[in-house]
Amino acid sequence: MFEMTTTLIGGLGIFLLGMKYMSQGLQSIAGASLRRLIGAVTNNRVLATMVGFLVTVLVQSSSVTTVMTVGFVNGGLMSLTQAIGVIMGANVGTTVTGWILVLKIGKYGLPILGVSAFVYLFSKHERIRYTALAVMGVGMVFFGLQLMKEACKFLKDLPEFQEWFLHFQANSYLGLYQCMLVGCILTVLVQSSSATLGITISLAVTGLIPFETAAALVLGENIGTTVTALLASLGTTTNARRAAYFHVLFNISGVIWISTIFFWYIKFIPWLIDVDVTKEVIVNGQATFPESVKAIAATHSVFNILNTIVFLPFAGKIATLLTRIVKDKPQEVAHLRSLDIRILETPVLAIDQSRGEVLKMGMICDEMVQILNRILSQETPATEDVDKLFEYEEELDRMQDEITTYITHLLAMDLPQEVISKGRCQLRMADEYESISDYLQRIAKFRLKLNKQGRAFDEAHNNSLLDLLNMVEQQLTHVTTAYQEENTDIVSATVHSGEEIKKKVKTLQREHLDYLSKEKVDPYINVSYTSTLNALRRVRDHVINLAEALAGEK
């Protein structure tokens, strides 16, 4: 009994870990493809469904795709109609796992795992390493499945378990709903419909449960998998919750209508793929039912394909209905919703989301320089300009904190070198942009303090500061534009413009000293002028740091 229990738990653990490694490896290999696919999502429901299918095939997890979709809706990057299409496609895509398990390579799972593990550990080429990780995941999936099958053989010989399983036979509607409930609870517990599918296949192949019971368990698993999306929607925007609720509605409605024709359906599937689910094959003195694997995979696929065909024409109306039923919150958080922790499941997409926020920081800094220009140009700065500049500085502080937290979580994961490099670059750039905003606010404070005291720069000094600020603005805009266009070859141009700014600062400082020796200057004006020059020089230093970070220089 102990050996059977440990084998079953060990097999399930290896299966789940294999699914994780396979997903992680495939995501790393298909990073660019994933980005293109998500970018291709439109309001065309058929195209969105195809994208959901392909993304799920690439990441080998409908839960990851669905949670990621909830994250995108939460960040305002995907509409509810688009999300509905993607979720339907994800449900079809997850059935591919069942067909992978149909492959008769269970006994080769351990050799596949061993060989790919060596390649992963000793290969220096990153793409080869992550391909090996994906293959290692496949090996673990089959080895875990093999272990679960072995454990189920022990179960078959125990009269207590045979008697217990007799209570869960889908030979009546009561039995059908009992089996669906078991499948649902099991999926909620292990948080993976693929794992419960593997357990179902193990039970069916060893003859512990008949095909109809396995089919009922599969239907229950489809309900259980919706819990992941529901949990992911907690604390999100209204639209994100609507997307999660659609996933529940889609799967539960599908299970309800298919259960009404269940006994016809379980006869139709074996006929459709031409298999005999009652055919026994003796292996090592044990009776097995290998044909049931194909039938279970087909049951899963046909159900999700039919359900998608039924729901697809009504996607727009369902979105409208959910919008009416699930009311908008009075106030929703607007800050950095795209940095959703749920998207961290797919690092290649997560790093793109944080890049967008760092770029937004750069654009806000550009706007701050323009506002500061207006403040320095006016005799009495406009209140709205001053308020906006201070508001932007506080916003950049918050943005930097959130970006740092997000990327720190991301970098704690096992990532491709490309993602690590981008993450480090973004951390540094967010810090530099925030520092620039501090200096811009400081310059504004110098001017406001003078105004409060009834003092002001003379025209010559004020114009010299405006000229210097224009030079800094051009340098900053050049770097931000380069980041937007992913142009990393900007260090030399930025350093050159930085040298020009440095010379200008020295010239102005020298001219100011000459002026001090000839004219009597108010001490407050003197301090404010020299402090403004120093602050602009520090902005110039941080812009050069931005260019170096963008180019990957340390």
Image (cartoon, helix red, strand yellow):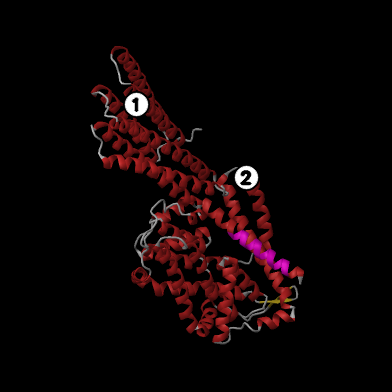
C-beta proximity under 8 Å, tags 1 and 2: no
Residue furthest to the front: 453
Q: Quadrant of the N terminus?
A: bottom right
Above or below, 152 relative to 398: below
Q: Residue at x 27, y 41 (%)?
A: 383
Q: Nearer the viewer, mark 1 or mark 2?
A: 1
Residue 67, percent from left and from top: 48, 61
* Disc assigned to residue 173: none
Magenta includes 18? yes
Closer to the camera, 539 or 88? Answer: 539
Lower sequence index among marks 1 and 2:
2
Residue 454 point in image, percent of width and height: 26, 29
Q: Which residue is mark 2?
A: 123
Q: Tell me the magenta residue range.
A: 5-19
The residue lying toward the viewer, choosing from 437 and 520, is: 520
Q: Amino acid at mark 2?
A: Ser
* Quadrant in which residue 183 is drawn: bottom right
Name the residue that disc number 1 marks.
528
Q: Secondary structure at mark 2?
A: loop
**Principal secondary structure, stretch drawn in magenta:** helix
Locate residue 73 relative to residue 275 in the image: left or right. left
Secondary structure under tag 1 reads helix
Q: Give 359 or 207, whichever is nearer the viewer.
A: 359
Identify which residue is drawn at 51% across, 60% down.
64
Instruction: Judge whether residue 39 is colored magenta.
Output: no
Q: Is residue 483 above or below residue 93?
A: above
